[in-house]
Image: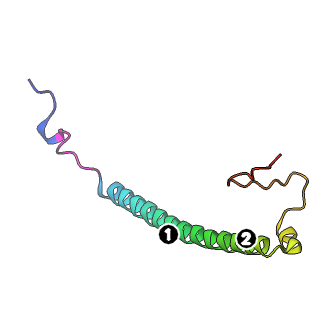
């Protein structure tokens, strides 16, 4: 014997219209904010990448030109500054 009334079964129960509208509005707002955040975040990251690449190219050009003053101006004036090259070491490195 089924104790649940057929008119109250889970398949027949619908949320009230006002709660459904609030839910749809909340989902739409979340999607809008997420889309806005991700599109701006990507553009900002691309701008930061372009700026970093330009600074790095300027730094390499100054090194290749043996312009010590230009290289020094781009480095942080700190005893903790460390330059690391991942290339091969010269054969007579100490």
Judging depth in this view, the residue of 60 and 5 nearest the camera is 60
Judging depth in this view, the residue of 60 and 47 nearest the camera is 60
Give me the C-alpha separation between circle 1 and circle 2. 32 Å
In percent of the image, x 79 and y 56: which residue is there? Answer: 83
Classify the position of the C terminus by image quarter: top right
Q: Is residue 16 left or right of residue 12?
A: right
Q: Would you place residue 3 above or below residue 13 in this image?
A: above
In percent of the image, x 16 and y 31: which residue is there? Answer: 4
Image depth: mark 1 or mark 2 in front: 2
Callout 1 secondary element: helix
Q: Is residue 59 left or right of residue 34?
A: right
Q: Residue 60 bears which disc, if any?
A: 2
Residue found at the far top of this picture: 1
Badge 1 or badge 2: first in the primary sequence: 1
Classify the position of the N terminus by image quarter: top left
State the residue position of label 1.
39
User: Which image quadrant for residue 27?
Assistant: bottom left
């Amino acid at each position: 014997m089924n104790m649940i009334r057929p008119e109250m079964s889970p398949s027949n129960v619908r949320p009230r219209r006002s709660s459904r509208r609030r839910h749809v509005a909340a989902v739409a707002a979340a999607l809008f904010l997420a889309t806005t955040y991700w599109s701006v975040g990507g553009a900002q990251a691309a701008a930061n990448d372009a700026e970093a690449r330009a600074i790095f190219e300027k730094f390499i050009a100054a090194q290749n030109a043996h312009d010590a003053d230009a290289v020094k101006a781009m480095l942080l004036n700190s005893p903790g500054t460390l330059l690391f090259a991942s290339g091969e070491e010269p054969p007579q490195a100490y």
